[in-house]
Image (cartoon, helix red, strand yellow):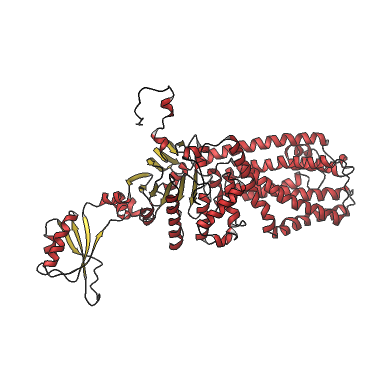
Amino acid sequence: MSGYVYNSARSAREAADWSRRRLIITNLRAVFGRAYPRIIGLTREPSWVFFEIFLPFLAVSAFVFVYRALKAPEEYIGFVVLGGAMTAFWLNVVWMMAAQFFWEKDQGNLDLYFTAPMHLMSILVGMAVGGLVMTSSRALAVIGIGTLLFGVSYHVQEPLLLIGVFLLTMIPLYGLGMLFASCFLLWGREAYHIAELLQEPVYFLGGVNVPLRALGPVSALVVATLPLAVGLDAMRQLAFPGAQSTGVLPVGLEVLILVAMGIVFLVAARAALAYLEHLARREGRLTLRWQ
Amino acid sequence: MRWYPPRPAPCPSPTFYETLPMPSETLAIHARAVRRVYKAKPEPVTALAGVDLDVEPGEYFGLLGPNGAGKTTLIKILTTLLLPTSGTARVAGFDVVNETAKIRRVINMVAGGEQSGYGLLTVREQLWMFSQFYGLPNREGWRRVDELIEIVGLQERRQQKVRALSTGERQKLNFARGLLNDPWVLFLDEPTLGLDVSAARDLREHTLRWKETAPGRTVLLTTHYMVEADQLCDRIAIVDHGRILALGTPAELRRRVQSESIFRIELDQLPRNGGLAMLSQLPGVLSAVRSDDSADGDRAGASSIALKVALASDSALTSVVTAVAEHGANLIGLQKSEPSLEDVFVELVGRGFGDETEGAK
């Protein structure tokens, strides 16, 4: 067969007749395909190590020194280090998930995603998987360096549960990113500003650098809406001795909240994506560059 | 009105007629009364004002028109990126509104000036990534990528990062991407936009070679380069202000504006005893004038004179050539002047491509 010709189908109609299995496999391949640039990007852009590990670590260090100066309980140092690691995921969700469709549109990729045979959710999942892998290495670096430098001691009685809660946190967190990806595109050219707007308030409300209970009555509301806050609170309770006293809700309840959030955000992301695609096709605006 | 095949007798089964392909389902592209209106202020903009179009499988079809004619809007509708405001359109027999998933399995699209993909990936990786979106198995995907890299001549750049490619190389990469899934209908939206002459020529050659090698594959090309449309397309639709003004083969379109045969005749001197006036009076000769590009210069030691002779038909040429010889002039060159597609466009629209304002007056 010539290099130009790949299809063995005898007609276009035959070529368009895909089995359910082929459809599923194509979507799985699309997930892997879209995750690839993010994973490979780890080795291609070493400058990211400086910007995404060293710089965030400076903020972590500042809080550590403040807590030490105030003679705060020692587990607070661990809270901050863990919070710093989880910050990397929030940054990834805001900048490389939520704002991503906006950049993809300007690059001309969005058109190609729309016209390819996979579901757009596969692209979003691929971005999430790639982002998760990429960010995990940075988060681990922050935890490793922080633990060594500040002598953080962990007391993990249920390591599997801790890993499970971490993974469970990632589902609603990236689900929220997927939902935002469609919303940012719908909201127009202010994606950059919206991303900035989401950054600092979430650091504060998510209890990244302070125990969530320190926020007072607001904390309960926050726990109910921000997956980062719920997950972080549960992970702190599982990783540090005595953290149950600073936790907002029991871990079991927080796990249930994370599960519910995961379902809600993923379903909402799918619905937003369907609406986005319909609107894009109806209005003819969303896939146009520089709009 | 739709045409249905005649009913054969006897009828094999009640569902027999439903399985017969309708004409619109056997065409590569079928559009009827397609309109597209964009919301805009102060008033809506009509990008397509009722387009009817049939493209046969295997055709290289061109949409030729100036910027804003509606070409890209039509491509966006056919590639399922945009809904028509009204009318129906089918690609490979599938409806663009309700059967988008099926259409997306058999099409691909390459646009001019496209910056798709990710700059940090190598050429190979970029193509492989896109191959995954079309579900190519991993090993087969890499093989296909290497084949296409070789076909478009990017072997030496295969391990280069995409951001290091020149504009021409980038467009070759885009073209390779467009062939990854071996599409049955390939949409090329101004594919040579911004390319230098050599890169544009390479790309045109690739599209032609692909068409020749892949039977049954259809290309829909939009362009505002007349030469490109002329060189590549089996048929061309001239589009302006959202309407198809003329449709046919390049030769048919030219014939539409050519009611007379025009020849450029180069002589060593003007015929004696009457010159141009004598030629003009010959039967079948409509006019004979000095051509603007008459050399009158030294050419191999002799001056030459170019004439533009309009004939009612080609058969009158014999009497012209004979008369020239009888009146002491020698024929140096003879060339039939064909009207260009631009002449066709000017004739149809009353203005040139880059002359929107003048045309609007």
Where residue B227 appears, as percent x and y from the top left, is 37, 57
Question: Would residue A200 be seen by someone viewing this image from the given angle?
Answer: no
Does residue B168 appear left or right of residue B306 in this picture? right
Q: Nearer the viewer, residue B211 or A109?
A: B211
The residue drawn where x is 83% and y is 47% is A79
Q: Is residue A162 above or below residue B125?
A: above
Where residue A83 appears, as percent x and y from the top left, is 79, 48
Where residue A29 appears, as percent x and y from the top left, is 62, 44
Question: Would residue A37 be seen by someone viewing this image from the given angle?
Answer: yes
Where residue B85 appears, as percent x and y from the top left, is 44, 37
Does residue B306 appear left or right of residue A157 in this picture? left
User: Quarter of the image containing the N terminus of chain B?
Assistant: top left
State which quadrant residue B156 falls in: bottom right
Q: Is residue B139 above or below residue B202?
A: above
The residue drawn where x is 67% and y is 43% is A177
Residue situated furthest left in the rendering: B273
Q: Nearer the viewer, residue B346 or A162?
A: A162
Q: Nearer the viewer, residue B166 or B360?
A: B166
Q: Nearer the viewer, residue A200 or A286?
A: A286
